[in-house]
Image (spheres, rainbow, N blue to C red):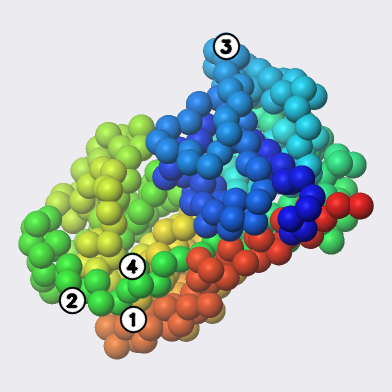
Amino acid sequence: MDSSSPPLSLALIRQRYTPFGGAERFLDRAMGALRADGVHLTLLARSWSGEVAGLQTLSCNPPGWGRLWRDMSFACCVRRQLRRHHFDLVQSHERIAGCDLYRAGDGVHRVWLEQRGRTLGWPGRLATAWSPYHRYVLAAERRLFESSRLRAVICNSEMVRAEIARCFVIDPAKLHVIYSGVDSERFHPSLRERWRVETRQRWSIPPEAFVLLFVGSGFARKGVPILLEAMAQLPASVWLWVVGQDRQSGAMQRRARRLGLGQRVCFTGGQRGVESFYGAADGLVLPTLYDPFPNVALEGMAAGLPLVTSHQCGAADLIRHGENGLLGDALDRAQLVANIRLLQADPVRCAAMGRAARQTVAPLTLEAMSQRLLGLYQTLLQRG
């Protein structure tokens, strides 16, 4: 940028900013490059934790009781701050109209409710339709995507881009697919040699077992219930790690016991590092009901694991069924069982699919992600 011009200012909106969030990891490298290019960065947040080096912070923390009032009060506070301060570009990670740039990391709420409705009876669907919170989010989402000020939307998958184009009146040219990047050196097939024996011994899993890995929170949305049902139909040689913390962990463990799964399903809770689990597993399984694009899919594929996921997961963008992974509908238990059986019954094909999975994500480097994001920023930040 022209050194004679005043520094450009970029506002980032995130209700709760943590150094480990997916949105924050996505931004980290690009933010460093923008700072080096002289861009002044300001974070508008209700709360933040950890270091926010290089970011000026503006607190937007009005009282909030319940999720509806919490989201509404935060949005109102942000709009007040934006009226008081001038920014050349406003980027939001929350559904707040009036921003220049929005990252649709949470996908489309309308589509999530459509998918969730498939699992509910009519009382549940009726309660959802009349829920004040869901009605507010749907209205906020429409105002955001159909705002005349919105100049660009970052979509983390083609699935999300297509959903936005289908659900809202928006110029398709505003929709930019930028996949997250993955550290292919950290998540590497060599993890198998380092961790396979040790991790299986630590969790008392037989060395000859075929081990599936699930990583994530939001168990109901990401398919843990149907995965447990599928496990009950699989041979006793198939084991499962469920890595992640969720408020339904206790209920899912009780369900596993009712299904007679015994020790074949290991709930590990949250783990600081998942590399050892990638190294010890044979396949990554994410039968999600709705997920725009989980980072864990990239990590597992980079580590050489074939991915079993659903058409309702943004990672399906990258899957060629039978070559580098396997697909099915999120609620098709029979297909999920068949996909897992295919991997378990043919170790040679399973390994080949894992190698193909790594080749698929090889171009999705952190550097490539940063460059695409920076290019979009620089286009939007041009003056005149």
Q: Earlier in the sequence, mark 3 or mark 4?
A: 3
User: N-terminal of the two: label 1 or label 2?
Assistant: 2
Between the residue at mark 1 and the residue at mark 2, the CA separation in whole angstroms equals 17 Å
Q: Quadrant of residue 213?
A: bottom left
Horizontally, is 122 left or right of 198 in the view? right
Kindly identify the residue that appears in the image at 50 percent across and 66 percent down: 366
> From the viewer's perspective, is 233 left or right of 358?
left
Where is mark 4, residue-wise?
Answer: 186
Q: Nearer the viewer, residue 116 or 141?
A: 141
Residue at 72% across, 46% down: 7
User: Could you classify mark 4 by the number of other residues whose Cα lies within 10 Å: few (under 14), some (14-19), or many (20 or more)?
Assistant: few
Q: Give SS at disc 1.
A: helix
User: Which is nearer the N-term, disc 2 or disc 4?
Assistant: 4
User: The N terminus is located in which quarter?
Assistant: bottom right
Which SS class for mark 4? loop
Name the residue: 80% across, 24% down: 83
Cα–Cα span, label 1 and label 4 = 22 Å
Picture disc at residue 63: 3
- For residue 350, the mark is 1
Question: What amino acid is at disc 1?
Answer: Cys
- Checking the image for residue 193, the label placed there is 2
Q: Nearer the viewer, mark 2 or mark 4?
A: 4
